[in-house]
Amino acid sequence: MSSFPYTTLGDIDTIHSTLKASFLSGKMRNVSYRKEQLAKLAYLVKDNTKAICDALYADVNRNPTEVILSETSIILAEVANVYSNVSSWAKDINPPTGLNFRLMKLRIKPTPKGVVLIIAPFNFPLLLTFMPLIGALAAGCTVVLKISEALPNTSPLIQNLVEKYLDPHVVRVVQGGIMETSKLLQLRWDHILFTGSARVGHIVSAAAAKHNTPITLELGGKCPVIIDHNYPDFPLIARRLSWGRNLNSGQACTAPDFVLISRSRQDQLIKELKKAYEKFFPVENNLPRLISTDATKRIKGYLDGTEGEIVIGGKTDVEHRFISPTVVMDVNGTDTTMQEEIFGPVLSIIPVDSLDEAIDIINSRPQPLAIYVFSENEQFKEKVTRSTRSGSIVYNDVVLQAGVLGLPLGGAGESGHGQYKGKYGFDTFTHFRSSMETPRWMDRIVAVRYPPFTSSKHSAAVRLTAVSLPFDRQGRLLYSRRVQPWLGFFTFIVIGSMLVSIYLNSHPNAWLQAKERFLQWREM
């Protein structure tokens, strides 16, 4: 039972109809009003960072520094970036086209999709609620935020701040559990963005399909790490893995889940991980807690059943939702720790005999949200990149890509589809509406389309629609097309030279006068 009030089912209907009417009123078509809402969202976070940190500390024992680094600072940077660019993103686009259609005023009009639903998880409740919200507001949508029911201090705070700072006819929060979410999914939305588990993602997808609603899924998965045995800095690998695996006690969809490393270098990695863990986590009780006792029991079950060797950590306390940062070595692909995404502070180490074996292991599993590669060898990195698939691939670091300006966040295959952040978030919640306008006078040219189709119309149609292919039957670019980009340049040079020659012949003293002026300028 929740310790804070849930939104009633009747209120959910009212919220939906209110936001639909608001969208149809055209309020959010005004880019200036979108920017006003974005600015208010930024100050919502900026003014209340301490309250946000306090709420997350009360709920899951998260350190304020971690909250600032992994949530609030990223949101503020994202808002600033989108605010600065949304005016240009929202302008009509003039698409490249053929000569036949240039007089038809072709445009692509970025148009807000409408009323959208964002379903956010518990693990990064500010980041994974407000980052997609930024894209939706920039696109001009009205938004319902369904936030996690598992955070009794943070979720009510988010609702109170949204109600205080943002226009209630543009953004509303729905609180609740399965019943309230099911009610939301019965309604017709113009887009749904869901972040969470694959199991719930299937439910959301099925509900969206009933209304042909477009959907973005961010589902996570087991993110692998591949380590080149020739990498020169194992202490750096250990530091970055220790941080990325244990950020928010491992409750991050982009966290490294298991490591593939040469059998001969496994012991060296374990040695460096022990040093890093001892330095990073001197007081284990200061670490964030898992979200529930059920989550703690699930991960404890993995550790109890593992056939690998627990070489770091392994302490569990179900009552207090705590598992110490843990490393398990000599793990195989069928181990209990390899069955599904851990979503906790447990790192599995799988020794392999070759890079090909590591790639085969990755390709035998569902596509992950991210692959992490530690190598300074370009051929090694290129082979991993070319031979695998994932939402993102990061070299010599982990997790950071989720917060970097300019990079989209999104999965591939079983880890989700669609993406957001920055321009990609704007695009997700935007319909790019094709537009053209044909002048009346052009009817003489396009009259060939009207029946009856005579032989003369057939000939005209062939001429009008003729396409010169730039390649031969083997797909090789034709020689004439290879030199074509240079023709304009050479034409300019030839014509320019001719004009200069004509001018000098008609003004024989022009060259001497120009030379004298140049020398005078140099002496000044």
Image (cartoon, grey):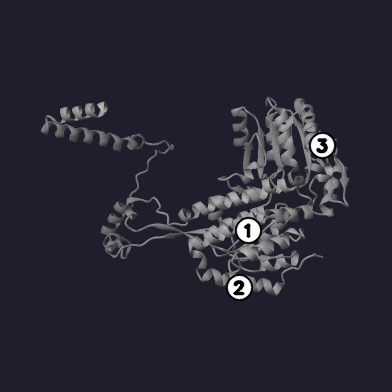
Type of residue at label 1? Leu
Q: Where is residue 42 in the image (x, y as percent from the top left)?
A: 60, 56
- Tell me which amino acid carries mark 2: Ser
Residue shown at the point (50%, 68%) measured from the top left = 26
Residue situated in front as seen by the camera: 205 or 53: 53
**Marks 2 and 1, Cα distance to the nearest angstrom?**
26 Å
**Callout in the foreground (2, 1):** 1
Q: Residue at x 47, y 57 (%)?
A: 90
User: What element does badge 3 sit on?
Assistant: strand
Residue 126 versus residue 276 in the image, above or below = below
Task: Report which quarter residue 183 is drawn in.
Answer: bottom right
Residue that badge 3 annotates: 328
Q: Residue 44 carries which label?
A: 1
Question: Image height check: is 71 above or below 179?
Answer: above
Residue that protrudes farthest toward the front in the picture: 524
At 82% from the left and 65% from the top, the residue drawn is 1
Q: Earlier in the sequence, mark 2 or mark 3?
A: 2
Mark closer to the chain start, 1 or 3: 1
Distance between mark 2 and mark 3 Cα atoms: 52 Å
* Side of 134 where 197 appears, left or right: right
Circle 2 sits in a helix, a strand or a loop, which is it? helix
Kind of element beneath mark 1: helix
Disc number placed over residue 420 in the picture, else none: none
Task: Pick the quarter of the image with the C terminus.
Answer: top left
Who comes first in sequence, dot 2 or dot 1?
2
Q: Which mark is residue 17?
A: 2
Circle 1 packing at 10 Å, graded few (<14), some (14-19), many (20+), is: some
Q: Nearer the viewer, residue 99 or 33?
A: 33
